[in-house]
Image (tube, grey):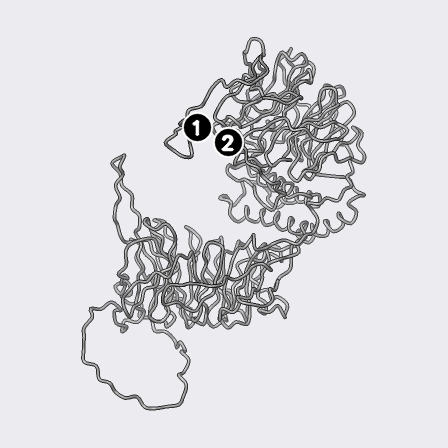
Amino acid sequence: MKYSLLIVVMMIITHVSKSQQEARLMRFPTISNSQIAFSYAGDLYTVEKAGGLARRITSGDGYEMFPRFSPDGKWIAFTAQYDGNTEVYLIPAEGGIPKRLTYTATLGRDDISDRMGPNNIVMGWTPDGKKIIYRSRGIAFNDFTGNLFTVSIDGGLSEQMPLSTGGFCSYSADGSKLAFNRVFREFRTWKYYKGGMADDIRIFDTKSKKIEKISDTPNQEIIPMWIGKEIYFLSDRDRTMNLFCYDTDSKATRKVTTFTDYDIKFPSSSQQEIVFEKGGFLYVFNVASQKAEKVTIQIANDLNFSREFIADASKNIQSVSASPGGERLVVGARGEVFSVPVKSGVTRNITMNSGANDRSAVWSPDGKNIAWISDKSGEFEIWMQAQDGSSDAIQLTKNADSYYFSIKWSPDSKKILFSDKKLRLRFVDVETKKINEVASNSVWEYNDFSWSPDSKWIVYTEPQKTGMNQIMLYEIASGKKTPVTDTWYESYNAQFSRDGKYLVFVSDRDFNPTYSQTEWNHAYTDMAKVYMVTLNSATPNPFAPENDEVVFDEKPATTDAKPAEKIVSDIVVTTDNIQNRIVALPIDASNYWGVEMIDQSIYYNRKGKGDEKTHLMMYDLKTRKEISLGEFDGFQVTANGKKMMIRKDKVFYVVDLPKSEIKPDKSVSFAELKTTVNRQQEWSQIYFEAWRQMRDFFYMENMHGLNWEATRDKYAVLLPYVNNRHDLNYIIGELIGELSVGHAYIGGGDCPQPKRIKTGLLGAVVAPDPSGYFKVTKILQGANWSSELRSPLTEMG
């Protein structure tokens, strides 16, 4: 679409003239009498207050953030990940070797892109410049709360400040009082929040220990900065985050900035000025003039984390599907489509486009083509290309108005069945590109569908309001729909047998309650079995009682002709009374999925309450016996019915269609799944897909009244300035934050990761002793009967 092309052009122009232009996406600034320090692409920089060319002073593999100048401007305290853990460091303002000041326990949620924010964030300094204040979750019982600590610039043990919880804070000039927030939610992508965690500004008197609340609105009042007799802070009481000022003498509050485009983010102050980020730029607010001016800054360095690089796509596999004969696999990985040899040969990247997410690739049953879903046009559409990449890709669908989930070829390779977020099941004719609707729903999307061997019928699972989903048959010629199961029981995973005589499916029809040992209640588990339906009423029951009869051995006529290949003719379906032709496989009730039937063999996965791992099972109709083929997590029978692709964890094998226990010898190698990634193109694609995901999946079609296209464009202008995956997460977070809804967060991605060295705890409180040594003042008692909860210092002996 036009907006995607525009951003790509912007990025090309931007990176050609990178060293000539003004920098953007500078984060977490701080200001002294002469300098500004800030984080950019994960490193710290300093620049003169008037702006100009910034100088990098850190270059760690992790993310350096929240710099804070000492009161005399000679030192910068900051939070970094040099040794893997996120800790407090100190560096001379002119640069030098960072000194680590804190040693805390490793946390599971400790990332700049996590909604809880990183641990051990530097908040500021004590007025005498001897200690650094930081917020830590080191002793918090959950990730929502944190405490304020101080640590000496000389290092040593940290001291907890006498507050139950704490966030951003600022001392009065004489150090007698502290303005602070109790709550810390600045990394949550939930703008205009007015819930129970909307914070207020409080003043803590260090002598009397009394606390006074100085703001009391339903809005967020955050990040206090004490300057003289005034406390400046951020508030979104007028929707956009702006600076407000509280006079400690008059108790009056006034608004001092009036921005309406972007929020002010993460301000900090000296005693004369406040520096903050807004729309990716840095601004300095002069307390005397009450005016804010943008600071023009240039940055020139190698921007290592935004360079083009060769990625190992095997770490990001999205889909795997076998060729009709099992010679190759088509793999969707890191937004590309690869053709991978099973035994030997060349791995081909079919798509080679960092600016598109190519996914859900499947091989046509005739072996000629590969189809996949791609957003290279600006929306997810279905594309097709020759399996060897020898021809240009053909776009089969256009003008998509929703998110496409998955696709499935018809056995004759003439149609592709697909479902979307508008709760439709449709198929596209490969030759005419005409789209036909099979079914639509108002409850949930279709994610369970398949073709008949003659490509004239479709079986699918129809979502129901009761949750008891129903299997349906659809005849393409007539458009007639026939329910195969009723809505009393949950039924799913229906497939036609390869000869077209049966449907096989899974259904939850066994009720075996398990009673609790601690309360008078019960639960139902292992409710499923595999079932069969004869499609033609003339087909005998495969489980009819056995009856020995006399067999006449008629000698067949001799012939030299080779046996003819099995050709599936038009299948015959007797829809009348079809629900009464359901029979269950005589197997134990458990959890089953992924059913396929070939000849007299029915294959399926099982993992019940008594199974430690998933088992691949086969039921032989001829012998009426169930066989375990091994511990495998998934399988796919090839289109020709002669091979099977199996998966164990993340390892894939292709074997002959098994009849007994599988003992695979060699797995398929994904070692050559390499792709050259243009990070800027990939980041642009991710941003626009995130925007579409919210458009297509948000629970309110009106997007809470937002002009969603305008909101997209508002933050898209920042894309050319992204030089670190965390920056992209920040922009996406700002985008979805405009929806003002909970639990819509952003995280993860291919971010720079320092080597993590986990740090544990002794379960003891240690304090300095006048002797110069340290004293254990408290030993925490663990639940020593549990290996995970033992207290180290209470061990026996």
The image's mark for residue 143 is: 2
From the top left corner, tell me how far across and down residue 176 is, in percent.
63, 11
From the top left corner, tell me how far across and down residue 14 is, in percent.
75, 47
Q: Nearer the viewer, residue 319 or 181?
A: 319
Q: Quadrant of the N terminus?
A: bottom right
Q: Quadrant of the C terminus?
A: top left
**Badge 2 element:** loop
Drawn side of residue 10 relative to residue 218, left or right? right
**Badge 1 element:** loop
Residue type highlighted by circle 1: Ser
Residue type highlighted by circle 2: Asp
Q: Residue at x 24, y 85 (%)?
A: 553
- Quadrant of residue 478 in the image? bottom left
Which residue matches tag 1? Answer: 791
Whichever of callouts 2 and 1 sits on the residue coming sooner in the sequence is 2
Viewer-nearest of labels 2 and 1?
1
Taking 482 as reference, is 75 above or below it?
above
Q: Residue furthest front?
A: 797
Q: Find the distance from the CA under tag 2 to the CA under tag 1.
A: 21 Å
